[in-house]
């Protein structure tokens, strides 16, 4: 009777679990097709009431069901289905808007949410290109956003593929951001004093800022024939997510060649 009450009642009155299933059932078999079978006519109630084997042998209800199953019409039932009354309360929807005051940088978020450094570099490269092109469109004159290498070549700035200059520019943006997070004091001293204090851990690396304001290792290799990035590698904070991603990239590039090969590959640039 309870299930029949669910099927014949207003679906909106029931809880979501019941309402969804009732809606699914009546979409296949309409509610009007469901009837109530009294207990004395229900074969399923024979076993709970208890029947001896001698009684079951001469018990047609168990084998054939109620008599009206063989008739052309089904007798109407007038059983009253009593369901517990549910107090319908009007619930007013309340919308709350909260703001979270977090100054999370775009690059920091990319580093935290991605496991591949090349994916991050490409995203930054595309965003950098978009910003540069749109800002160039807003400004007039020859000095419009020349900090991006491809702005000297309008055709290159609008091509579909990223160039090596795009990748280098994006890599520099990421490195500068991470260095500013970890070495803010050191960079400030280099910009204001030209050197850093002796009690700072980076002092033994003779750090300096290159033309792109990237913190690099100094030293006496400046007269060697090595590439500039190898002579003066960029300083990467060892505990940063960037360091982890660069190591993972070098390890994969060297085909998992081991710690020494991975370290040697990294030291060519960092």
Image (tube, rainbow, N blue to C red):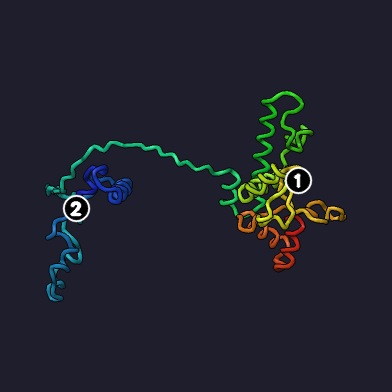
Is 42 rendered above or below residue 120? below
Rate crowding at label 1 as few (under 14), some (14 to 19) or many (20 or more) other CA atoms within 10 Å. few
Rate crowding at label 2 as few (under 14), some (14 to 19) or many (20 or more) other CA atoms within 10 Å. few
Q: Mark 1 falls on what kind of element?
A: loop
Instruction: Give me the C-alpha separation between circle 2 and circle 1.
Output: 80 Å
Residue drawn at (30%, 48%) of the image? 16
| Quarter location, residue 37 | bottom left
Between 257 and 17, the residue placed more toward the observer is 257
**Residue sitting farthest toward the front:** 198
Q: Is residue 180 visible?
A: yes
Question: Which label number is shown at residue 250?
Answer: none
Foreground: disc 2 or disc 1: 1
Q: Is residue 122 visible?
A: no
Could you tell whether 168 is left or right of 3 in the image?
right
Q: Earlier in the sequence, mark 2 or mark 1?
A: 2
Tell me the residue that label 1 is attached to: 210
Q: Residue 1: x percent and y percent? A: 17, 53
Residue drawn at (12%, 49%) of the image? 79
Q: Residue 59: x percent and y percent? A: 14, 68
């Amino acid at each position: 009777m309870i299930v029949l009450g669910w099927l014949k009642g207003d679906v909106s009155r029931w809880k979501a679990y019941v309402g969804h299933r009732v809606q699914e059932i009546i979409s296949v078999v309409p509610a009007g097709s469901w009837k109530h079978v009294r207990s004395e006519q229900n074969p399923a109630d024979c076993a709970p009431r208890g029947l001896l084997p001698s009684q079951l042998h001469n018990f047609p209800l168990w084998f054939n069901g109620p008599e009206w199953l063989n008739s052309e019409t089904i007798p109407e039932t007038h059983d009253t289905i009593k369901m517990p009354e549910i107090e319908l309360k009007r619930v007013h929807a309340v919308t709350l808007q909260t703001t979270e005051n977090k100054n999370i940088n775009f690059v920091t978020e990319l580093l935290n949410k991605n496991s591949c450094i090349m994916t991050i570099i490409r995203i930054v490269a595309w965003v950098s290109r978009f910003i540069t092109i749109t800002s160039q469109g807003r400004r007039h004159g020859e000095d419009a956003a020349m900090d991006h290498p491809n702005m000297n070549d309008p055709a290159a700035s609008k091509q579909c593929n990223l160039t090596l200059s795009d990748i280098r520019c994006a890599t520099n943006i990421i490195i500068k951001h991470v260095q500013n997070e970890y070495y803010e004091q050191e960079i400030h001293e280099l910009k204001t004093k030209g050197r850093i204090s002796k009690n700072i851990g980076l002092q033994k690396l003779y750090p300096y800022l290159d033309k792109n304001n990237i913190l690099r290792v100094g030293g006496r290799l400046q007269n060697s024939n090595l590439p500039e990035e190898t002579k003066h590698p960029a300083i990467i904070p060892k505990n940063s997510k960037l360091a982890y991603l660069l190591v993972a990239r070098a390890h994969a590039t060297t085909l998992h060649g081991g710690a020494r090969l991975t370290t040697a590959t990294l030291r060519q640039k960092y």
